[in-house]
Amino acid sequence: MMDYGFIHSLNDNTLHIPTSEIRYPTIPKECVRAIKPGDIPFILHMHSLKYAKNTCSMLREYSHMSIKWSVFKYSTVFTNTDGKIQGYVLAFVERNQIHVYEAAAQPDALYNSILAHCKSLASEHLTSDVIFTCLLNMQ
């Protein structure tokens, strides 16, 4: 929610997008893959770039990602054609919906790829909505 030129960092809002409303093109399959433990430094760097200026943001250390690997191992990363990580998303299928708990991309245009991936997940699992419970911090 945008109030007076800033976005609340501790939001309790969600963004519901019906799967049928996502109209972004598909992304090359070679540019989407499951996260690997070796990706943690790149994910941390991207997370810091996107959230460092947010009030009350929770910047992470490597140990946090290692301890929470049982959750983050379900993330998907997005790369350019050279294999450089440019974005990631942590999403789960819950209650016949895709729930996105974390997403970051650099450049911001890659958020279209994240949406396309969520639509693909929704189609695969026959879900009706994509629900973002995270702050999409585009600059």
Image (cartoon, rainbow, N blue to C red):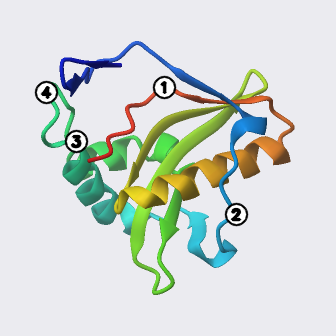
Residue 26, labelled with which disc?
Answer: 2
Q: Secondary structure at mark 1?
A: loop
Residue 133, labelled with which disc?
Answer: 1
Residue 55, labelled with which disc?
Answer: 4
Q: Nearer the viewer, residue 119 or 60?
A: 119
**Residue in the picture at 20% in, 47% down:** 61
Q: Please, is residue 23 above or below residue 10 in the view? A: below
Q: CA distance from mark 4 to mark 2?
A: 34 Å
The answer to whether residue 124 is left or right of residue 86 is right
Q: CA distance from mark 3 to mark 4?
A: 9 Å
**What's under tag 4, amino acid-wise?**
Thr
**What's under tag 1, amino acid-wise?**
Thr
**What's under tag 3, amino acid-wise?**
Tyr
Mark 4 surroundings within 10 Å by alpha-carbon count, few (fewer than 14), some (14 through 19), many (20 or more): few
Q: Secondary structure at mark 4?
A: loop
**Residue in the picture at 87% in, 37% down:** 126
User: Toward which corner of the image does residue 106 lie, by quadrant?
Assistant: bottom left
Precedes in sequence: disc 1 or disc 3: 3
Residue 97 in sight in this render = yes
- The answer to the question of whether label 2 and label 1 lie on touching residues, with beta carbons closer than 8 A, is no
Q: Nearer the viewer, residue 134 or 71?
A: 134
Mark in front: 2 vs 1: 2
Q: Please, is residue 103 above or below residue 96 in the view? A: below
Precedes in sequence: disc 4 or disc 1: 4
User: In the image as oriented, which residue stretches furthest toward the top?
Assistant: 12
Q: Mark 3 sits on what residue?
A: 51
Mark 1 surroundings within 10 Å by alpha-carbon count, few (fewer than 14), some (14 through 19), many (20 or more): some
Residue 35 in sight in this render = no
Q: Please, is residue 27 above or below residue 57 in the view? A: below
